[in-house]
Image (cartoon, helix red, strand yellow):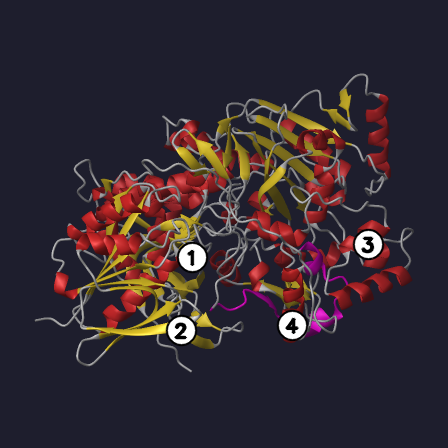
Amino acid sequence: MEVTRQSMDVDIVCVGFGPATGGFLTTLARALVDEAGQPVVESRVMPGMPPQVLCYERADDLGFGVSGVVTRARGIRASFPELDPAEIPMAHPVAHEKVLYLQDPIGASRRSTGVNLLDKLVSGGRWLLRYEDHAAELPYTPGFLRKDGGLLLSIGQFNQWVAAQLMGSGLVQLWPGMPVAEPLIENNAVIGVRLVDQGTDRLGNPDAGYLPGMDVRAALTVVGDGPIGPVGRKLDEHFGLPPGHHQRDWAVGMKMLVELPQGCPLEPGTVLHTIGYPEPEIFGYLYVYPGGTASLGIFVPSWLDSPVRNSYRYLQHWMMHPALWRYLRGGRMRSWGAKSLQESGLQGEPYLAGDGYARIGEGSGSTNVLTGSGVDEAWTTGTQLAEGVIELLRAGQPFTRENLEKAYVARRRGSWVEKEGRAAEHARDGFQRGILTGFMGMGLTGLSGGRLNLSGSSRPPHERVPSLVDYYRGQLSPETIEEVRRECTSAGTGLHEQLMERSGWPEIPYDGQLLVSHQDALLMGGKVQAPPGYADHVVFLSSDLCQRCQEKLCIEICSGQAITPGGDGGVPQFDREKCIHCGACVWNCTQARLDDPEHANIEFRAGAGGLHSAEN
Amino acid sequence: MSSGFHLVVCGSLVPDPLQTLEPVTGPAGPALKNEMMLPSVLDPWAGHALYEAAHLAESAPDSKVWLVSLGPKARLQQLMMSIAQKVPFELVALDGSAGGFTDPTEVAAVLANAVQGIAGLERDRLLLFGGCASASRDAGATMQMVGERLGITEQFLAVDELTVECDGSLKVLERIEGAQYQISVCAGPPAVLAWATGNLPEPPNNPQVGMVNMRSVMPALQRAQPAPVAAEGVKFLDVTVPRQQRDTRIVRDMPVDEIARELVDWIRG
């Protein structure tokens, strides 16, 4: 049936409101009118007015569901030279920074011979190091990890602060709660975007109050919808990635905002980075905000080759490590969430511009994978695009690929974002060969400014995630695994809780305020919800592939327990009302599509709802 | 003479009910911890009133909807991003507290003044809508007092349905005690209708509606006058939020009757 869609013409449409789009719109809005408030350039669609600039954000409000960061904030400070961190709720200058190597205090962590040797060396040399509570403080924090002069930011609060100024200017419109389904592509040019259909059933069929998604046509589409954004991914499907590029390296960052207990000695501005525990591949962080709160979390990377990797359970074990628990015991969860991070950096960079569109931010490969910094880089790519767009608008030139290459891409190539990103490009390749090789590779890259690297070939999940039997060989018998699988499938749960406990991880002693069940974290911390009338955005493409899949890592990794075993153990079930839109299912699916092995069997489409917390 | 209505909706924001709300005592009295950081939503009762007003305006040509909103300007601006795509309205913004620790009398005075100040508002076409209560100011008295101050004596509380009859009279379905409805008919505007839940779902987001609304929303926010409301003379002896108790369990294919029985047992327990 032919669907009649409304259509609307604007000058510039942006997809996704994160730091990159914040940087873009902040720079652009300042240049659209002169000091007298008169348009410097005229709208093509509303002559006499300034250009009509709209931004659509998927989440129910701006700043929902992102996280705490530590950033050097060079690009942000360049946009706000007089910035006083006190203006931004929860922001604070970086004061102390240290790296802790966490040993395994309970003996359940899977440590290679090399890591065990490292543990012994650390234990043996404890008199040389600051060693306490099964943790050693690295005597020296390498320069590439330090954020001297930087800021701690709650990105939720920062985004809201930026948005308030933008809306106050009256020059741009920001619309949260409005997912964008896909780009509109004609003759290989992007001519705008299509908003998601509303008033549908779970399969997307028209239902009560059906409103077909509107086509928003624009001379320029700015794509800043992050690494799992449907518009960016559709562009990648259509145009492909540049030769030699891939997007195989990921991590899921799971985090909390915690109200620290009374008497906690950590001071605002303190930054702790951790390595070594709960699994050696998992990194952690703890940033102390003013007002007795801290943002903390872990990163579970795609090179942690476990078929039952689960961020929530690991986060709880990480918090309970004695070196952290001494600060956190008695604390209270205020908010919680998770997000996928694109860890391929420049190796995952898509085409940055084409006819009618430009890519900015994390989805454009701007994250520096050596320094672990993404927000400032994303912001800066937004400002670079805005400077180019202003140039083209003033010159009356169209947004063709050629013009955007000159005005935006060349600007980006000549900037610190590119220079440092290029030096970091292969910083994490060593992790493909093991955790110690990874650390050595990062060190080598960092200390040599990218001139020396350790190599390692990235592989998609179907080539690297082992079977359950192989993973637990020597620890659990195939019969035990099968028994757990039967029990969990029948109970509608994932396998990781049982398998982790049977392989040595202790039960979590719930305290009802910081250590709570995963479901309670959804309610207490994530405040997760989904409005009715939208199609499911997580779609299992081939039921055959799901039937064949033994591991079903999508269920284990799901940050919101939104994916659970299907009735017959085949195609998993998806509950939209629990999804926090982290997108981890996409890159954890171990079943390659038959016609496109670079992509897996789960499609992550545009969807409404998710986390409802901006304290992060 | 036009047959359309002038629909004025009084409604503002409340903290997103999913947030962790914690009362604290500040220098100016009770407040919610981190209130300015908590996401806000349109007060659910006011939301019903607004959607009913928009629906009525759509069916009665030459009608117009105003939304009179009292809240911190920055938070109102943020709220508008969420609701301005829903239905067409013209905003009248008042820059003051939207917290739960204000005196309804003061709030009503400010709202009534704002309504009186709306240019072009015709009293004989005026239907004053609002929530029958508020998620943060749940005295259930504010709309009555606004009506009193404007001299509107036709007042209906806890309204679930409004029908405009052929002769222009208004038939109103009102909730009353004992889980019953009362049906009233009044000759026509002016009237106050404080809505319970109405019958309309939340409208979908319509970008064109958003574009049109925003042309007047931003100037209205820039014009917003300070509207100091407090609780002069009121003493808060104790402030608590309702206690929550959670008991989560995943079940599959459980008969509805059994779920209901379990819930009842759980509540009784």
Q: Which residue is mark 4?
A: A542
CB-based contact (under 8 Å), mark 2 and mark 4: no
Q: Which residue is mark 1?
A: A177
Up-down relation of residue A547 to residue A450 (above or below): below
| Closer to the camera in the image, A598 or B226 | B226
Q: What is the distance, in whole Å, between disc 1 and disc 2 at their CAs? A: 17 Å
CB-based contact (under 8 Å), mark 1 and mark 4: no
CB-based contact (under 8 Å), mark 1 and mark 3: no
- Image: magenta residue range: A533-557
Sequence order check: which comes first, mark 1 or mark 3?
1
Q: Which label belongs to residue B176?
A: none
Q: Which residue is mark 3?
A: A499
Tell me the quarter of the picture where residue A408 sits: top left
CB-based contact (under 8 Å), mark 4 and mark 3: no
Q: Which residue is mark 2?
A: A209
User: Visible in this render: residue A370?
Assistant: yes
As shown in the figure, which amino acid type bears the numbered disc 3?
A: Leu
Chain letter, disc 1 residue: A
Sequence order check: which comes first, mark 3 or mark 2?
2
Tell me the quarter of the picture where residue A437 sits: top right
Respond whether the residues carrying marks 1 and 4 are from the same subunit. Answer: yes
Q: What is the distance, in whole Å, between disc 1 and disc 4 at their CAs? A: 30 Å
> Who's the residue at 60% across and 46% down the image?
A344
> Who's the residue at 29% across and 55% down the image?
B143
Sequence order check: which comes first, mark 1 or mark 2?
1
Q: Residues within 10 Å of mark 4 (few under 14, many from 20)?
A: some
